[in-house]
Amino acid sequence: MVEDKKQMPSKYQPQTVEAGKYEKWVEQGVFKPSQDPSAKPYSIVIPPPNVTGKLHLGHAWDVTLQDMIIRSKRMQGFDTLWLPGMDHAGIATQAKVEARLAEDEKLTRYDLGREKFLEKTWSWKEEYAAIIRQQWGKMGVSVDYSRERFTLDEGLNKAVNKVFVKLYEKGLIYRGEYIINWDPKARTALSDIEVIHKDVQGAFYHVNYPIVGSEEVVQIATTRPETLLGDTAIAVHPDDERYQHLIGKKVLLPLMNREIPVVSDAYVDREFGTGVVKITPAHDPNDFEVGNRHNLPRINVMEKDGTINELGGKYAGMDRFDARKQIVEDLKTEGYLVKVEDHTHSVGHSERSGAVVEPYLSTQWFVKMKPLAEQALANQETEQAVEFYPPRFNQTFKTWMENVHDWVISRQLWWGHQIPAWYHKETGEIYVGEEPPRDKENWVQDPDVLDTWFSSALWPFSTMGWPEEGHDYQRYFPTSTLVTGYDIIFFWVSRMIFQSLEFTGKRPFQNVLIHGLIRDSEGRKMSKSLGNGIDPMEVIDEYGVDSLRWFLATGSTPGQDVRYSTEKMNAAWNFINKIWNASRYVLMNVGDLTIENLEMGQDLTVADQWILSRLQNTIEEVTRLFERFEFGEAGKVLYHFIWDDYCDWYIEMTKEQLQDSDHDHLTTKSVLVYVLDQILRLLHPIMPFVTEEIWQQIAPKGASIVTATYPVVVEGYRHEEAEMQMQELIEVITAVRQIRNEMNTPLSKALSIIIKVKDQAIKESLQSNQAYINRFCHTDHLEIAIDPVIDGEMVTQTLSFAQIFIPLAGLVKIEDEIKRLQQEVAKLEKEVERLVKKLSNQSFVDKAPAQVVEAERTKLTDYEQQLKAVQVRIEELKPLI
């Protein structure tokens, strides 16, 4: 039975390895907190993915990093909670459902009505939540599903209402008429950070405004002539001598035949353009402020869908951009248009719908940000500060908080937390409360919902049961670490910090690990328009999830972007296959040995002592780097230890030890198993599936590596002398291999080797390990001496502690080597000739990119140098024939 158990396929097959493991882990409950009251708690709340669709590669990176942290902490004995959940993503999800409704049923949400539309949206949520859970499972995320939350669940709604009411009672939430960012496609308000600015080719339209009662005109320039319909003044700077005589007079508004005043305001930049600006208080945030200072009327000429309303005169009913074209044409016809200049300017677009955002006068709910921001900034100067990794993002956070504007939190949507405010049907009185007013038949609830980020901002504590301060809240809040991308520091991280400080008096998390974005192999952001998106599930199907996780974990440093490439994925798979084959060798050679019956006897070779000592250094360094979230560096340390030290050197050396009848084979086998066990435990947080598969072969029956203890340094296994001796041994073997390579001597040819050492200690060390030198260097004669006799033509390699001499005649047959080198000369001469001809072609030099030409010149120089070196070597060998 044991022999069957330990038979592993000759090649790593991820689909077979991964099958059934996740379901077993969930069934066994190994992802749940330990319930050990003596264990230190460590908690993470997952950044909830939107239920708008499937997870992408960025999500895969995000959850991989979190899973690595939580798995390592679980193994280190912490009482770990990784709480899963999803975000309702108001505007984004509603847009998806509306699009499906239009396509499948040719209906709008208004056709269905609010209640039935929300039923459709909840169905969408259930559909995509199931897909996301399936994808989490495929990624191996070790979350506690029994605590899963949703930003629109009943508990979250209770928390949201309490926060809204408390902020309102403190005067930190208010309702007012202001210029906001309006999405005419989604027909909702947007916060500043939901607006993406893009450079757009537009125009400056120069228009004359006639001064009433004179022949004089003033010229203004605008990029949005359709807003002219809502102008209520023009403004000049109070100190601009050119226009002093106009202040207080009136101008005739072109096309509208409405007289509007000339006001003076320091807002005007007298150096820009003509120094005269049009004021449209209902359609520009700066004009809104000017209008307030001068008691100007606010004329909103636009409907919520971006069409002109009845206040726009004859343009009523036209789309804003169609109206723009007609207005420009009419200005030209009526003689008001002076000129049109091409102008590239930054235009706001809705992050979700892509529509051009309209500055729009609207009554909305706002959060007064200054007091909350000041509290968050003050906290960053205390011992309870949120620690950002990398630290530079702390400044990003502070800069945004120092310059934050009031936050518009109402959204004209149906999918979301409906604002807990009611208006009296007769008096118009506003009631704000966690529960509806008692005589609710006389009141109507505000139809708007709250910005998605309002509920997401409460995520770290609302998911723990707040406002009830139960077991989870007391045990796991504040959370330990948040992992997220740098693109949502403003959206989410900042808001969680100020809301948590305001409502719990505590920071929401101790650490924030910031990662970058995943880009394609050319460094471009992945997008549908470029067609360069990568589905993580397809990558897993091809390479296995452990390969993907290894690439994501080790592909960059904190805060930096990572580039995806098939080459990197192939390299990840190859690394796991190397581990697989090394494990297979171990299992084939250790019989029934498991981690329960190891016997690390006294008969340790220098190779045994060296690998155990190197293991302690690796454990120490990987643990240190994990604590600092430097997973890329930790991966490099693991990679070199596993591939170089364990596989390429130690395993090869055990082949010599296991053939030595005088050596204690049980010790060698025990070291092999012990180091493999420790490697698997170190790797498990990154590669959960393959490590479980292999570990089951050497572990106690029924145990899982998920809950195995994480490696710790055993000081008794440190052995500096063995490390030094082994390093000398490796340098000798590497030097001989290098000579073989340079002389083109196959490994099958035995060599005579003389090693001249500088002292007796080195001599004894190398002599005691000469069996390894004989095996790895394939010698037929080996002499290790302080003062050996060196006779004849030798190839020499100098090391810091020794010189290696190999008779030249023993390395290669001189005639054959000269023949081979002459063939090399012919090949190099052809390359040189080809490049000289190419670079002599003036057409190529003139038309090819400069870097291509330079690369060809560099290649020519390299080939010429190689040719010269080979020719010199031939001349050196000729006298030896």
Image (cartoon, helix red, strand yellow):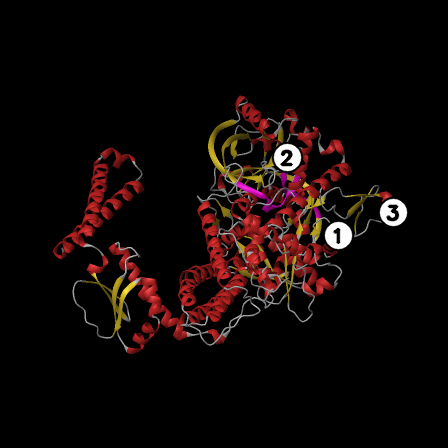
* Residue 622 seen by the camera: yes
For this view, does 187 lie left or right of residue 652? right
What amino acid is found at the position of numbered circle 1 in the picture? Answer: Asn
Identify the magenta region.
Answer: 175-197
Quadrant containing the N terminus in the rendered view: bottom right
Question: Does the segment drawn in magenta span residue 191?
Answer: yes
Mark 3 is surrounded, within 10 Å at the Cα level, by few (under 14), some (14 to 19) or many (20 or more) other residues, namely few
Nearest-to-viewer mark from 2 and 3: 2
For this view, does 400 lie left or right of residue 419? left
* CA–CA distance in space, label 2 to label 1: 28 Å
Pointer 2 residue: 185
Q: Position of residue 698 (x, y in %)?
A: 56, 63
What amino acid is found at the position of numbered circle 2 in the picture? Answer: Lys
Above or below residue 715? Residue 393 is: above
Q: Place residue 537 in its image quadrant.
A: top right
* Residue 487 seen by the camera: no
Q: Position of residue 753 (x, y in %)?
A: 25, 66
Q: Position of residue 183 (x, y in %)?
A: 63, 38
Nearer to us in this view, 317 or 313: 317
Above or below residue 784? Residue 335 is: above
What amino acid is found at the position of numbered circle 3 in the picture? Answer: Asp
* CA–CA distance in space, label 3 to label 1: 19 Å
* CA–CA distance in space, label 2 to label 3: 37 Å
Quadrant containing the C terminus in the rendered view: bottom left
For this view, does 402 lie left or right of residue 475? left
Considering only order in the chain, which callout, 1 or 2, is on the residue closer to the N terminus? 1
- Which numbered circle lies on residue 439? 3
- Which numbered circle lies on residue 161? 1
Question: Does the segment drawn in magenta span residue 457?
Answer: no
